Amino acid sequence: MEIKTVKLGIINENCYLISSNSGAVVIDPGYYSDEISDFLKLNCQKERLILITHCHFDHIGAVKKLSEEHGVKVGIGRLDSAGLSDPGLNLSHSFRIFSEPFEADILFDDNEEIEVGDLKIRVIFTPGHTKGSVCYLIGDSLFSGDTLFFESYGRTDFPGGNGEKMRESFYRLTTTLSKSVTVYPGHDKTTTIGHEIDFNPIGYMSIL
Ligand SMILES: [Zn+2]
């Protein structure tokens, strides 16, 4: 499995391009780029899917265009799907950015296992940053969206955010996944579950 990071937009959103022998997945194409389009073109013989970790505009901005251009389906956690067409929920209204409404093809439930070619993907429901944020676990790699960052975590003061649920999600990830799992967040650099157990400030807050 090969993972490529594409940094996009004014807030350096991380879009991930993942490919294997017979599967290709794009996670959170928040802004259009030729690199993402070329990746989908290059992998057109494989099974392909666009995955969204949560509905915020900086993670969904290019989904509709890429999906239509390449005929690739789109999946998101069921509880965040309303945000794809709601400028209040996806923050495009508050950030004064136009986000064309669209619908996803597949709505995931917690713990769902999906297969894209030979890529096996587990959907982990991790509310807190938004009502329906999910992380995607592929092998030993966790794509955490804005739930878990390097020594940090996503804001919980946006619509649908919830600090208590964020702590529960952090607890769930750090108690069920191996310390060696690499975390690929929606912003900033990669980390590991083990590092976040030791250094993430939300961990201290759960103990206090
Ligand atoms: Zn976000």
Image: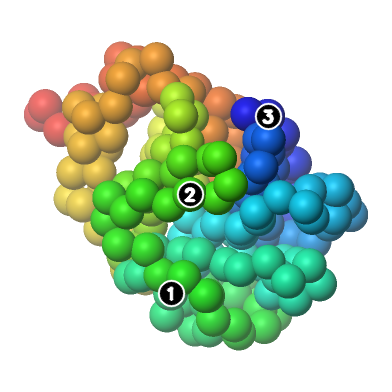
Instruction: Compare marks 2 and 1 and give the one earlier in the sequence.
Output: 1
Tag 2's secondary structure?
strand
Q: Are marks 2 and 1 in contact (CB under 8 Å)?
A: no
Q: Quadrant of residue 160?
A: bottom left
Q: Residue at x 73, y 71 (%)?
A: 71
Vertical arrangement, residue 62 with respect to residue 119, above or below: below
For mark 2, what is the residue? 115
Where residue 2 is drawn, which disc sits there?
A: 3
Q: Residue flagged by tag 2: what amino acid is it?
A: Glu
**Marks 2, 1: nearer the viewer:** 2
Q: Is the CB of the residue bearing disc 1 within 8 angstroms of ligand 1?
A: no
Q: CA distance from mark 2 to mark 1?
A: 20 Å
Nearer to the camera, 166 or 29: 29
What secondary structure is marked by label 1? helix
Q: Position of residue 175 (x, y in %)?
A: 20, 27
**Image position, residue 91 (x, y; %):** 53, 72
Q: Tell me which label, 1 or 3, sits earlier in the chain.
A: 3
Q: Nearer the viewer, residue 6 or 57?
A: 6
Q: Residues within 10 Å of mark 1 (few under 14, many from 20)?
A: many
Q: CA distance from mark 2 to mark 3?
A: 16 Å
Q: Residue at x 55, y 57 (%)?
A: 51
Residue labelled with disc 1:
81
Where the C terminus falls, by quadrant?
top left
Residue, x 37% and y 63% (percent of image)?
108
Relative to 14, say whether 125 is above or below. Answer: below
Q: What's the amino acid at mark 3?
A: Glu
Q: Give the position of the N terminus as an image quadrant.
A: top right
Image quarter of residue 199 = top left
